[in-house]
Image (cartoon, rainbow, N blue to C red):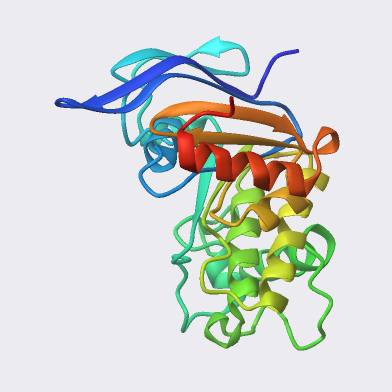
Amino acid sequence: MDHRLELRNVSKSFGEVKALQNVNFKLGNNEVVGLLGDNGAGKSTLIKIITGYYQPTSGEVYFNGQRVDHLNVPKARALGVETVYQERALAELQTLWRNIFLGRELSNPLGFLAVKKMKSETHRLMTQSMGFTSAAVTPESKVGSFSGGEKQGVAIVRALFFDAEIIVLDEPTMGLSLKETDKLLNFVRGIRAAGKSAVFIDHNVFHVYSVADRVVVIDRGQIAGEFSTKDISLDDLMEKMIRVAETGSLN
């Protein structure tokens, strides 16, 4: 099958430092892939290549089976890559509907802002796409009053509305309570339900395992292992993670 994204033998060096070495990474259609690894393992570099911030020193990048050369941030966004960062770049003093359409407002044929449409679209997205069920949350709600997990949900919904095919979640559970983390993980499941794909980067193997179809372990710039979550128990995965951290290898 064609993959939504594929990296083939991708390496990235910064002077003498080899941040990535011959990395092969795939993301299928309608798939959530968890990316696990310690600090300095190469997760951030890999994500910056996918999102166009870095160009690989060598190797090839494919989107939907088509090779893409000189990938940059605008090109990645045009190909449907959106990133949800842990710091949640939202305007806290603005309403929910304004945040969803911030910088990409809808207008009517006369060029005026289509406020009514943006509000109705916001309501539809929050209730249908991402399961916001609380009557207290409306398109007019100020985002600053939202919990951490709800703010992440807003960022995910915004990405989905603007036709993101691949949503990159960069440590999205950082600083969230257990309850809020659970809410965030439901939002991640909503990405798959919407027929899109996601790369979920996290330190916490429990969080990744609960939502990912596959888990890719990266260590010292190389892929140390790749597992389908339906074929490996959480205990076995944790054991392998510990072995990688100690030895750099699964063997």
Q: Residue 114, can we see it?
A: no
Query: In which image quadrant can residue 243 be found?
Result: top right
Query: In the rendered image, is residue 207 in sight?
Result: yes
Foreground: 226 or 160? 226
Quadrant assignment, res 108: bottom right
Identify the residue at image location x=76%, y=48%: 234
Q: Quadrant of the N terminus?
A: top right
Which quadrant holds residue 137?
bottom right
- The answer to which of 185 and 220 lies nearer the viewer is 220
Residue at 57%, 45% in the rendered image: 242
Find residue 52 and report its horizontal and vertical position in percent: 38, 32
Vertical side of 70 occupied by 243: above or below: below
Percent from the top left, x then y, of residue 182? 74, 69
Quadrant for the C terminus in the image: top right
- The x, y position of residue 236, in whole percent, is 74, 42
| Residue appearing at x 54%, y 65% in the figure | 113
